């Protein structure tokens, strides 16, 4: 008898994670795949691994994709639901620990904090500009020291006297580390100092102004680093919980969302797309002044979806470009005046401000 499964896919900047659960929300399979430069190839690899691992008859009833590549991969695999990372991580965290109040999530190039009260998200924040408090920060500094991130994790917890590292910027951190090495600090103290710098940066920037209350959950790829966990507990003066699915919580939460959504018929294209020749191409939409860049995803020679554009008329389309561009029902752009000018009379300028000049804007 065929078993029922729900698939969650989390496409991040550093890793691609896939989790398959059954109708009782028990895990069938999970895969954490370090990025190989192409989210398409990473997902194909993950689907192949799941297919080979389960070796039993499973009917996929629903698929949810999340993460920074959720739209692209959603079109590729045929996702029934596409959700943002906040929703997926919160869902997984609440399922794992229903009493959780604060979720720290640190990924490869972004970091987030989610505030939860009574099993509902009430607030969140994330880094929008700098990656200094993320996994790529640790990766780059581990390479600088000539060790792996796994070795960094084990080495950091051996330190009894972590040195102070400037962690606000990766450039300053590297300069500081070089200086500390040159004046004789031990490597284990430098590594633990780096972990503490990342946590200080995260709490001081991402979590600024947020109401942080226990229980605390730490998830994302960086949660596997023992030095980071130790630094969090030192700064918060409280135990930090590392949940069971901490490395793949986004994918686990996505699978849960698929399982809890009433999907009558899945759009999942099957595990065999692992063997398909899937690629992308781009073009510029010149239908308005925005000149949006549109992404096309192609399976062999067939376009299976498009994304991009402010008006969203291209989202999910696979038909001929000419039909979409000529169909007015696909566009919700406002018609703007052909020319808007704002003129200032030079005679009205203040004599006290030599910087004032006539203004003329054209749109």
Image: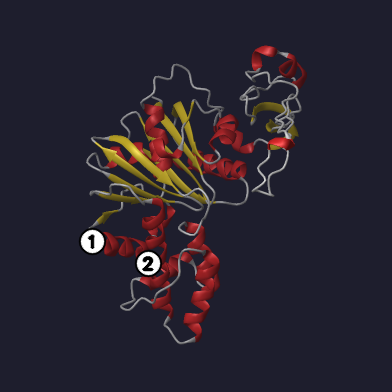
In which quadrant will I find the C terminus? top right
**Callout 1 crowding tier (Cα within 10 Å): few <14, some 14–19, many ≥20:** few
Q: What residue lies at 49% left-to-right and 76% top-to-bottom?
A: 177
SS at badge 2: helix
- Front one among 220 and 59: 220
Which residue is at a point 24% across and 48% down the rendered structure image? 213
Q: Position of residue 141 (x, y in %)?
A: 51, 68
Q: Secondary structure at mark 1?
A: loop
Q: Are marks 1 and 2 in contact (CB under 8 Å)?
A: no
In this orientation, does residue 166 appear?
A: yes
Count of numbered tags: 2
Q: Between residue 247 and residue 66, name the one nearer to us.
A: 66
Residue at the image point whose x is 22% and y is 41% from the top: 99
Q: Horizontal placement of 358 versus 258: left or right? A: right
- What x and y, as percent, mark residue 104? 35, 50
Task: Please name the residue that numbered disc 2 is placed on.
Answer: 196
Q: Quadrant of residue 337?
A: top right
Residue 4 is at least partly visible in this image: no
Q: Taking 313 as reference, is 77 above or below it?
A: below
Figure coloring: secondary structure
Q: Along the horizontal axis of the image, is 163 left or right of 81?
A: left
Residue of label 1: 237
**167, above or below 17, in the image:** below
């Amino acid at each position: 008898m065929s078993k029922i499964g729900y698939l969650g896919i989390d496409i991040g900047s550093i890793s691609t994670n896939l989790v398959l659960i059954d109708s009782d929300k028990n895990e069938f399979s999970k895969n954490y795949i370090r990025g190989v430069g192409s989210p398409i190839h990473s997902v194909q690899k993950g689907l192949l691994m799941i297919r080979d691992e389960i070796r039993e008859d499973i009917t996929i009833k629903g698929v949810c994709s999340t993460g920074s590549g959720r739209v692209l991969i959603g079109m590729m695999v045929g996702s029934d639901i596409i959700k943002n990372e906040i929703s997926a991580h919160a869902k997984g965290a609440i399922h794992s620990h229903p009493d959780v109040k604060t979720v720290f999530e640190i990924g490869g190039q972004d970091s987030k904090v989610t505030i939860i009260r009574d099993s509902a998200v009430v607030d969140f924040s994330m880094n929008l500009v700098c990656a200094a408090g993320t996994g790529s920060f640790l990766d780059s500094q581990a390479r600088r020291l000539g060790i792996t991130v796994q070795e960094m994790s084990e080495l950091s917890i051996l330190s009894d006297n972590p040195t102070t590292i400037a962690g606000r910027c990766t450039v300053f951190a590297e300069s500081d580390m070089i200086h500390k090495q040159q004046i004789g600090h031990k490597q284990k103290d430098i590594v633990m100092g780096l972990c503490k710098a990342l946590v200080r940066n995260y709490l001081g920037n991402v979590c600024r102004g947020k109401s942080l209350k226990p229980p605390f959950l730490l998830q994302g790829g960086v949660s596997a680093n023992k030095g980071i966990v130790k630094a969090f507990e030192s700064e918060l003066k409280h135990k930090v919980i590392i949940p069971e699915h901490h490395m793949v919580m986004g994918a686990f939460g996505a699978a849960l969302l698929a399982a809890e959504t009433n999907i009558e018929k899945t759009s999942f294209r099957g595990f065999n797309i692992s063997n398909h020749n899937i690629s992308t191409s781009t073009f510029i939409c010149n239908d308005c002044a925005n000149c949006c860049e549109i992404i096309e995803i192609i399976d062999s020679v067939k376009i299976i979806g498009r994304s991009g554009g402010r008006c969203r008329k291209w989202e999910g389309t696979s038909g001929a470009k000419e039909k979409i561009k000529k169909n007015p029902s696909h566009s919700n752009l406002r018609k703007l005046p052909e020319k808007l000018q704002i003129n200032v009379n030079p005679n009205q300028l203040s004599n006290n401000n030599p910087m004032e000049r006539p203004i003329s804007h054209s749109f």
